[in-house]
Image (spheres, rainbow, N blue to C red):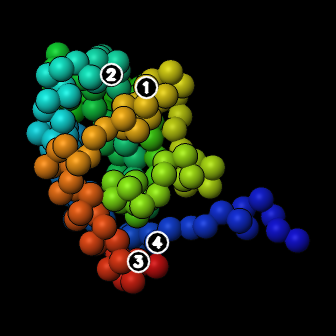
Amino acid sequence: MQTPNSTVSSSPKLPKPFSLPLKILPQALHNRFLANIINRILVNDLNEGELDFLQDKSVAIEISDIGMCYQMTLSGVRLVGANVQVDNDLTVRASLYDFMSMASRQVDPDTLVFQRRLVMEGDTELGLGLKNYLDGMDVEASRALSLVETVSKKTMPVYKKLFG
């Protein structure tokens, strides 16, 4: 007999010692770094107001196996690192491998939600807006997004072999 969790497939987890170098840097620096990368990748969408639904909302991206949480908010037309003391309006949580799976478009986020490998907590409307935005992204039209997808696809087999 299968228990509800026996059908949930798991993803490879990054061993804790590999995440230690990341934890040396202050959280605020992590937040700024990721916000700057996303600003470069999504510059056109930000300038066109496609992400205005994030205005003054705090969104956390939590990488569960690494134990890192990146917090951002939209201020004007740029994402900025959120204050680490603020309560997040939305938290998106998954393992590094599952985020890579989504970035490479090898796994649909809905599949990960149903398998309980991707969790969204907080403002449901904000979560739905973010999901709809991500679903509607034209990866082929963006050189940066295509690069992220390609790198993720190429590193996933190695990651799985090393940590699976």
Name the residue located 28 percent from the left edge and 72 percent from the top edge: 155
N-term mark: 1 or 3: 1
Q: Which residue is mark 3?
A: 160
Q: CA distance from mark 2 to mark 3?
A: 33 Å
Residue 57 in the image, given as x and y percentages of width and height: 35, 20
| Mark 2 Cα-neighbour bin, 10 Å: few <14, some 14–19, many ≥20 | many
The quadrant of the picture occupied by the N terminus is bottom right
- Looking at the image, residue 2 sits to the left or right of residue 121; the answer is right
Residue type, numbered disc 3? Lys
Report the amino acid beneath label 4.
Pro
> Circle 2 sits on which residue?
54
Dots 1 and 2: beta carbons under 8 Å? yes
Q: Which residue has dot 1 on it?
A: 129
Whether residue 60 can be seen here: no
Q: What's under tag 2, amino acid-wise?
A: Leu
Between discs 4 and 1, the one toward the N terminus: 4
Give the residue number, with chain letter if any, for mark 4.
12
The CA span between labels 1 and 2 is: 9 Å
Instruction: Look at the numbered discs 4 and 3 and tell me whether their residues touch, using CB distance below 8 Å.
Output: yes
